[in-house]
Amino acid sequence: MEALTAAAVIGLGNGFRRDDGVGPVVVGLLRERSAQRRLPADTVLAECDGDPGRLIELWDNTALAIVVDACFPPSAQPGRTHRWDAAADGGLRPAAAGRHSTHGLGLADALRLGAVLGRSPGRLIVYAVEGADRSMGVGITPAVARAVPRLIRRIAADIGQHGASPGAARTRTDPRDTTRRTGSATRDGSA
């Protein structure tokens, strides 16, 4: 049996849809930050387009999964961040009729599918950042960008509270490649 990964931070979104790319932006900045302030050695940093199969693969066999995504409620306050902790807040509910995820099935569907398959994370925390613009283009809006530094600190605190020692974080770019190594190597087998 494969060893449990302490934590995975998964940035959902599309970097070519403005604020919908906040998840990948957060993961990219966490990668840069981990060079100066180490994250636990068995922390995986990954980006995902929201496909349920890829998402399940990324959080499979993980003690803590932190998912960062954009949300676009009707009365959005761009940059406002919501934190949902499955342990404290119960199960995710599908979006109401007339609302949908920009990722097709959505996170709640992926979580239910993972549970049926026995491939859920030990604990799940979701950060949803309210966005203003999901049109075609690169770069997040200034209001969303201002929320990112605090969000990164909150994620690092969540990982630290979960209890792991500092080391080199790993990057996982292709969840279809399940080759894993121990130590500071990435889950995809590169050093």
Image (spheres, rainbow, N blue to C red):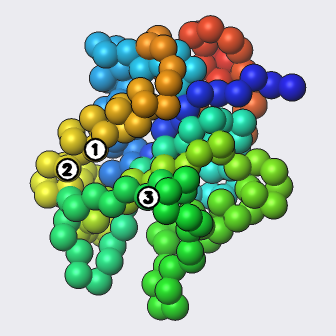
Q: How many marks?
A: 3
Q: Using a 10 Å C-alpha cutoff, classify the residue at mark 1 as few (fewer than 14 neighbours), some (14 to 19) or many (20 or more).
A: some
Q: State yes or no: discs 2 and 1 in contact (Cβ < 8 Å).
A: yes
Towards the viewer: 45 or 133: 45
Q: Secondary structure at mark 2?
A: helix
User: Could you tell me residue 181's position as x and y percent?
Assistant: 71, 14
Q: Return the mark for residue 147.
A: 2
Q: Secondary structure at mark 1?
A: helix
Towards the viewer: 159 or 57: 159
Single out the mark in the foreground, 3 or 1. Answer: 3
Residue 69 found in image quarter: bottom left
Q: Secondary structure at mark 3?
A: strand
160 relative position to 180: left or right: left
Identify residue for label 3: 84
Residue 20 found in image quarter: bottom left
Towards the viewer: 42 or 20: 42
Name the residue: 23% across, 81% down: 75
Residue 141 found in image quarter: bottom left
Single out the mark in the foreground, 2 or 3. Answer: 3
User: Could you tell me residue 151's position as x and y percent?
Assistant: 28, 44
Q: Return the mark for residue 151.
A: 1
Q: Using a 10 Å C-alpha cutoff, classify the residue at mark 3 as few (fewer than 14 neighbours), some (14 to 19) or many (20 or more).
A: some
Question: Which quadrant is the N terminus positioned in?
Answer: top right
Which amino acid is tagged 1? Leu
Question: Which quadrant is the C terminus positioned in?
Answer: top right
Which amino acid is tagged 3? Trp
